[in-house]
Amino acid sequence: MRFTGYNKRVKNNAHRNESKEDRLRRFQNNSYVESIETLLNSIDNFFNNEIQVARDNKQTSLLFMGIHAVALIISEAFFSKSGLDGYKLFLETYVDGDEDDKKFSKIATTIHDWRNILAHQWIGSTGHDIGYDYEMDLGWQTRNEVTFINPKIYCEQYLSVFRAGGRMWSYKELFSEEQLEEIKSRIIAKYVKK
């Protein structure tokens, strides 16, 4: 039996109002601000809304995969780093709080490995080493060799970097003009890559 529940064609939200050619031309012909802020605004306006829904409905696996995806998108574009190195650098630069239990970069390997299980394997022994505790006041804590994470705190710290005045929007302070042009080039290269 063939599923016919959706008869309308729907474009990806990140690409709704602009043709591929127009967006590429806009990126190429304008300053780095155009490509960087298009990327950041698109993530914030579309992807982060879905991450919030995952948080609000305790869809924890989707929350972890979504935040991880954004972390890698940003770290590859901004720092030219991928995998665990990029993920950890993203956490250190943007998400980590002041208290030890709010420094998620300290457990970056654990979260990264867990995300890989969720995304590529689903069942893996790593699942015995990680737990969720939505009620604890800490961001994360190790109990009896199991790392418990409060997904609400993790998500809130992540989302806060995109709010007005959040760390994500002070990207110009982190990079030189030359580095910002390199970020623009990486964003364009990823945009046209098939």
Image: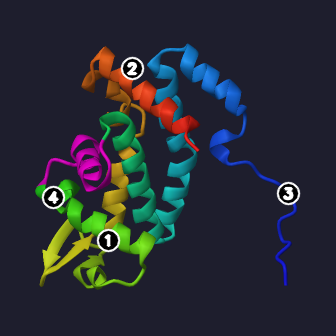
**Which callout, 4 or 1, points at the residue further toward the start of the chain?**
4
**Which residue, given by chain and number where applicable, does mark 4 sit on?**
106
Amino acid identity at mark 3: Lys
Front residue (pair 99, 23):
23
> Which one is closest to the eye, mark 2 or mark 4?
2
Dot 2 or dot 4: first in sequence order is 4
Judged left or right of residue 179, residue 32 is right
Which secondary structure type mostly characterizes the magenta part of the structure? helix
Vertical side of 137 occupied by 91: above or below: above
Q: Which residues are magenta?
A: 81-99
State how many labels appear. 4
The secondary element bearing badge 3 is classed as: loop
Q: Position of residue 46 (x, y in %)?
A: 58, 47
Q: Are marks 2 and 1 in contact (CB under 8 Å)?
A: no
Q: Earlier in the sequence, mark 4 or mark 3?
A: 3
State the residue position of label 1.
114
What type is the residue that disc 2 sits on? Glu
User: What element does badge 1 sit on?
Assistant: helix
Please tell me which residue is depicted at 15% across the width and 58% down the height of the picture. Answer: 106
Residue that badge 3 annotates: 8
Do we see residue 65 in this rendering? yes
Residue named by callout 2 = 181
